[in-house]
Image (cartoon, rainbow, N blue to C red):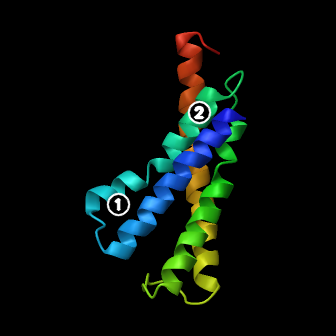
Amino acid sequence: MIGSLAGVAILFVAYSAWGIAIYGGSVTPLFDRLFLFVPAVAGFVSSWMAPRSRLAPSVFLAVPAALFAAVVNAALQMAGRDLGFYGGAIGPLRVAFFTLLSAGLFCAVGGLLAVIARRVTGRA
């Protein structure tokens, strides 16, 4: 439970920082690339802190990631920032769908790395 909350907290902070950076116009290519690995880090932390090194908590982090992405996208649209997606409700829904797919993959990879690391270190 605590691992999942830690993963959600990591995602919340990262998506909040992402939204602030986009709103401020200060997204650098390095920040853009590093942001892709946030779901993997959250998945790693979630699975590392899970009892018996389970993979499921990290995979389920894709849902909060998609929700955070949709909320940030909608908030930026309401603030007048053009993100290049469809306007209205379709833009955040598209972002949520693609984030669900990509974050699910990255969270699963991070969680799998945590499961492997716990088994190698004998903490499984």
Query: In which quadrant will I find the N terminus?
Result: top right
Would residue 75 be found to the left or right of residue 25 on screen? right
Residue type pointed to by label 2: Leu
Which residue is drawn at the image coordinates 48% and 61% (left, top)?
16
Camera-side residue of 37 and 75: 75
Query: In which quadrant will I find the C terminus?
Result: top right
Task: Find the residue positioned furthest to the top.
Answer: 122
Q: Nearer the viewer, mark 2 or mark 1?
A: 1
Location of residue 41 in the rendering, given as x and y in whole percent from the top left corner: 49, 41
Which residue is drawn at the image coordinates 45% and 68% (left, top)?
19
Distance, label 2 to label 1, CA atoms, is: 24 Å
Q: Quadrant of residue 54?
A: top right
Which residue is drawn at the image coordinates 54% and 77% (left, top)?
75
Up the image or down, 120 lies above or below 112; here it is above
Camera-side residue of 97 and 41: 41
Per the image, the residue denoted by label 1 is: 32
Residue type pointed to by label 1: Asp
Neighbor class of circle 2 (other Cα within 10 Å; few <14, some 14-19, many 20+) is many
Q: Which mark is residue 47?
A: none
Disc 2 and disc 1 in contact, CB within 8 angstroms: no
Query: For the residue labelled by badge 1, is the local secondary structure a helix, a strand or a loop?
Result: helix
Please report whichever mark, 2 or 1, sits nearer to the chain's N-terminal start.
1
Query: For the residue labelled by badge 2, is the local secondary structure a helix, a strand or a loop?
Result: helix
Location of residue 71 in the rendering, given as x and y in whole percent from the top left corner: 59, 71
Camera-side residue of 41 and 74: 74
Neighbor class of circle 1 (other Cα within 10 Å; few <14, some 14-19, many 20+) is few
Which residue is drawn at the image coordinates 56% and 28% (left, top)?
114
Location of residue 20 in the rendering, given as x and y in whole percent from the top left corner: 41, 67
Per the image, the residue denoted by label 2 is: 112
Location of residue 53 in the rendering, given as x and y in whole percent from the top left corner: 67, 24
